Image (cartoon, grey):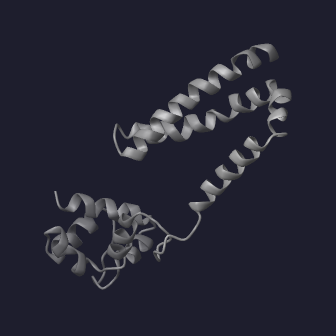
Amino acid sequence: MKSLFLRYATPFTTGLFLVSLVSGVALFLHIGPAAFHGMHEWLSMVLILPFVLHLWRNWRPMTAYFRHTPMIVALAASVLAGAVFFLPSGSAQGGRPPQFAVANRLLAATPAEVAPALGLSETGLRDRLTAAGFAVPTGAETLHDLAIAAGQEDSAILTVLASAGN
């Protein structure tokens, strides 16, 4: 069984790397189906096992690389390239996507403040929220407060808002 795993370690490492490469490029360029996201995440996790087996099988030759400057330079450059993404981007949101900032602003508003943006009256939005299981006692509560009072996540009330304009 051990020889079977070791025999397939490098081919699976290569195959899964190519899948990760294609899906990563598609994600970077924002092209292709949404399935690329899950495929990239999950199959990159699966890639860990054949990679470890590949290292195990090729450990002696691999250690020879560590005696030379190119491997040290390549590893240091890779770590530094990854570290750049942890530097602050200058935004107060910590570099989060702008749709999160918009969603947080909506959740901090009352139904009366949000309704016009959805092309609804305050009463119309309150009716939709009530029909979806969110009690709207006075209308002065924020949408976040309504979600908490209903024992729901913010995403549930955002789903109601997303369908309100249709």
Task: Kindly identify the residue that appears in the image at 27 percent across and 67 percent down.
Answer: 129
Q: Is residue 36 left or right of residue 5?
A: left
Task: Kindly identify the residue that appears in the image at 56 percent across and 34 percent down.
Answer: 43
Which quadrant would residue 162 be assigned to in this image? bottom left
Q: Position of residue 15 (x, y in %)?
A: 57, 24
Which of 164 and 56 lies nearest the eye of the viewer?
56
In this picture, is 113 found above or below 49? below
Which quadrant would residue 165 be assigned to in this image? bottom left
Q: Position of residue 103 (x, y in %)?
A: 35, 69
In this picture, is 138 found above or below 8? below
Image quarter (top left, top right, bottom left or bottom right) of the C terminus: bottom left
* Camera sees residue 1: no
Q: Position of residue 19 (x, y in %)?
A: 51, 30
* Camera sees residue 67: yes
Image quarter (top left, top right, bottom left or bottom right) of the N terminus: top right
Q: Is residue 24 left or right of residue 57?
A: left
Which of 154 and 70 lies nearest the eye of the viewer?
70
Task: Kindly identify the residue that appears in the image at 28 percent across and 61 percent down.
Answer: 160
Task: Kindly identify the residue that appears in the image at 23 percent across and 80 percent down.
Answer: 113
Q: Is residue 44 left or right of residue 60?
A: left
How many numbered marks, from 0 up?
Answer: 0
Q: Is residue 140 left or right of residue 120?
A: right
In this picture, is 43 found above or below 102? above
Which of 128 and 166 lies nearest the eye of the viewer?
166
